[in-house]
Amino acid sequence: MVKYYHCEKCKRVYNTETWIGEVHTYDGICPLCMAGEQQENHIQQENAEDNIIEKHNTKPTGRLKDIHENTQSTPIEIERNLLLSLEQKANDVFSGKYSIEVLIKEFKDELVDKAKERIRETIQSFDLSKHNAQKVVDFAEKTFDYLSEYKIYLDNLIKKLQDKPKMNIKSAIEKIFKETKANIPKDGAKDVLHNKKAKLKNVFGKTIKWYSFYSDTEDVYDLTKKMFLHPFNEIQKKLSTLPFYSSI
């Protein structure tokens, strides 16, 4: 089970850890709110400096107006910036600086769900572009659905290759599949067992496929990094084609 750390300001989940049962705490501040606080403090400092300047200058200044305009972001701009940051955050996950569960929840809540709302609001029903847009969102949702398991699979791959540096990489991928499948508990409900096996088979297939894309990469770290970033890059590429994000 999982313990979820929610931001005390915006209530987003900003971290998780393994826990006994499911627990939700509302302590601390997420990176987005922390950045907002820093920006607000900066603006307040700029305003204080402008007040001092205005006391010695009777001419009107447009600086405060410019600062206000430059620091105000529309919802669509926030979503675009989040989409642009996906690869960097995926990099942070790969290097252990960021939680995969938090990244998935953040992007599903703040981008994919928002994109679904925009499709309903901005694209006419029965329009081919609406059908295509919904396919893009469906692709993103299905991909996010298995990325947590995919990260675990690649972690196991990296560990196995570290333990046996001379092992063939494709053989290591196949061995992890067999070992993971054998370790799935058999005493659970049949539908749960079936879903676990289906997701494992899907992750195995993606791992083999993306390994084939980058198999000429000699360095194992660079290889596994490219394999890990591939689905995130695909999500970013496809979502950026949506009409309301296409200016990225």
Image: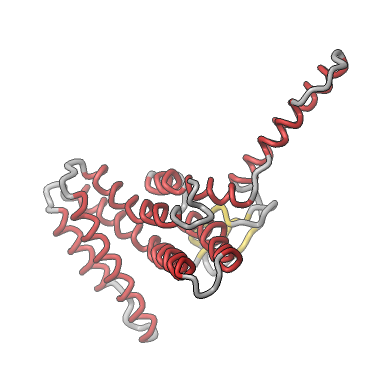
- Residue extending farthest to the bottom is 190
Work out whether 150 lies above or below 75. Answer: below
> What x and y, as percent, mark residue 146?
38, 65
In the figure, is residue 159 to the left or right of 152?
left
The residue sitting at 59% across, 47% down in the picture is 77
- The foreground one among 18 and 112 is 112
- The foreground one among 112 and 29 is 112
In the figure, is residue 130 to the left or right of 45?
left
- Say whether residue 77 is visible: yes
In the figure, is residue 210 to the left or right of 82?
left
Colour option used: secondary structure
> What x and y, as percent, mark residue 37?
69, 39
Work out whether 129 lies above or below 239. Answer: below
> What x and y, as percent, mark residue 55?
88, 17
The residue sitting at 26% across, 51% down in the picture is 158
Work out whether 96 lies above or below 12. Answer: above
> What x and y, as percent, mark residue 70?
66, 35
